[in-house]
Amino acid sequence: MPAPSEPSTAPLSRDELQRALALPVLDAAGTSAPLASHLAAGTPTLLVLVRHHHCGMCIEYCRTLWEQLAPATHDAQRPKLLVVGHGEARGIASYKERSGWLGEMVVDPTRKVFGALGCVSGLLNAPEKQPAYLEKHSTASLVLRSAGQMLRSGPLGIWRGGDITQLGGEFLVDADGSPAYTHRMRNTVDHTEVPELAKLLGVDAQPAA
């Protein structure tokens, strides 16, 4: 009998994924539509669920993802990369500017999509090691940057950027709508490393700048 999956990688059933994809999300204009409507047609979509709008660690992760994976996913037949946040829709433009993310981003301020995909909340589980996407930064410096961003956020305010305890993850939706990969963050920096995602997506990652 196979060993049970860890909670962070326990696979979703097709029904569980479809329920999550049926939930509404908002685009930068505040327009509501089912998450499924933002998936690519005829090719897989990688959902990248991030923490609050001010999280410096997730911002660096998105920057690294775009720099290293986006050049290999521009082809129409390549997987689509879609960032899903949970702050207010008005924060999308600022998030994309700060992270260098030129792809699509939507938000779910209710966090129902996060819950449906099994993402957890909590800040107590310390990371075992510094991930490669943060090798140019210290976690402490990014935490301070996040705090500064919260204070400078103006209309977004401290809380309108989303719940600071909510964690995200990476979920690959196959072209036929079935779940192909599941990873839920266990701490604030526990995103899937970019080389692992590149292998999963069947693309060549660009070397780090």
Image (cartoon, rainbow, N blue to C red):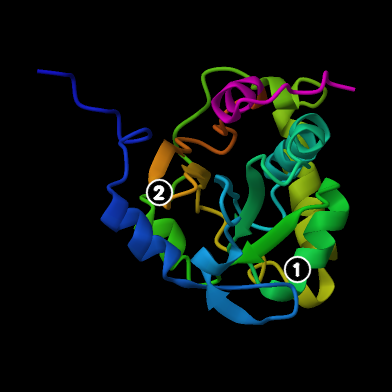
Q: Is residue 98 magenta?
A: no
Q: Which residues are magenta?
A: 195-209
Residue 47 appears left or right of 112: right
Q: Is residue 126 left or right of residue 150?
A: left
Q: Residues within 10 Å of mark 2 (few under 14, many from 20)?
A: some
Residue drawn at point x = 68 percent, y = 26 percent? 203
Residue at 73% across, 36% down? 65
- Foreground pick, 165 / 99: 99
Q: Position of residue 107 (x, y in %)?
A: 61, 66
Disc 1 crowd rating (10 Å Cα; few below 14, some 14-19, many 20+) is: many
- Using the image, determine if residue 89 lies above or below residue 43: below
Q: Is residue 32 above or below residue 38?
A: below
**Residue at the image point whose x is 42% and y is 38% from the top:** 180
Whichever of callouts 2 and 1 sits on the residue coming sooner in the sequence is: 1
Whole-Å distance between the Cαs marked 2 and 1? 22 Å
Question: Where is residue 79 drawn, in percent x and y?
Answer: 63, 42
Q: Which mark is residue 120?
A: 2
Number of numbered discs visible in the structure rendering = 2
Residue 100 lies, in percent from the top left, at 86, 47
